[in-house]
Image (spheres, rainbow, N blue to C red):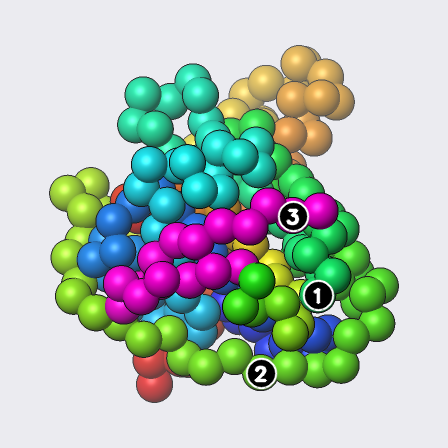
Amino acid sequence: MANRHHEFLDRGGRVFAISADTVPMNAAVVDKLALPFPILSDPDRDQVITPMGFADEKDPREIARPGVAIISPEAEVVYSFVGRDYADRPLEDVLLEELGQLGLEPTSQPAPELGSIEAGEKAMPYRGLSPYFRGAKFAGLAMRSRHRDLGEDFSGDMQAYIEMIDRYLEALRGVEGRRA
Amino acid sequence: MAIEFTVSDTAGNPWTLSDHLDSAVVLTFQRGDF
């Protein structure tokens, strides 16, 4: 989403990520990925994550499900997608189409202001992200090849997973560009 | 209607939805600790 941030702004939408992590942890992610938008913190999940239906009740870490909500200037939720798991996320093209239907004027968004930065204990260093995603992709390719007999549901899920990893790898190239 | 809520931004400042509705707001929910 960061790589196509300008396309969201062109359609009159400002982007805000949100997680249950602390403010310093979120600042660390914004800094690591050179994100052009902030990550908001809802540590108890009681302000927006749970009320809007994005709490992952099965995960003991008390985190959010991945997903997106688009809220119009009239405060209407015009689009909502709650992912089943970390590999279930809406395509940016879909989000831009939904946003464009609002017919809004282009807008702008200031760079996020960062306070104290403190990465979480499990946060992956930037240099590890590309090898991690490449490994995840090859694992997906291997599983798809090994289990071709499991039918179209499985092969379709695997294809979507592999394409998601490709988008992550492309997003990392965007990080390099923003850092340059 | 969307619920009104206040959370914290990456500088620790309060962030309230209704203060940001001069445009559309695209909220992307993250699992975190990444």
Residue under circle 3?
A: B2
Amino acid under disc 1: Pro
Amino acid under disc 3: Ala
Q: Earlier in the sequence, mark 2 or mark 1?
A: 1
- Which contiguous range is marked in magenta? B1-17
Q: Residue at x 60, y 59 (%)?
A: B26
Is label 3 on the same chain as label 1? no
Mark 2 neighbour density, 10 Å: few (under 14) some (14–19) many (20 or more): some
Q: Specify the farthest residue to the top.
A: A150
Residue A176 point in image, percent of width and height: 37, 75
Residue A9 point in image, percent of width and height: 64, 76
Q: Looking at the image, is B28 positioned above or below residue A37?
A: above
Q: Which mark is residue A108?
A: 2
Is label 3 on the same chain as label 2? no
Mark 3 neighbour density, 10 Å: few (under 14) some (14–19) many (20 or more): some
The residues tagged by marks 3 and 1 sit, at their Cα atoms, a distance apart of 10 Å
Of helix, strand and loop, which one carries label 3? loop
Nearer the camera: disc 3 or disc 2 = 3
Quarter of the figure that contains the N terminus of chain A:
bottom right
Q: Is residue B9 magenta?
A: yes
Q: Chain of mark 3?
A: B
Count of numbered marks: 3
Is label 2 on the same chain as label 1? yes
Quarter of the figure that contains the C terminus of chain A:
bottom left
Residue under circle 1?
A: A73
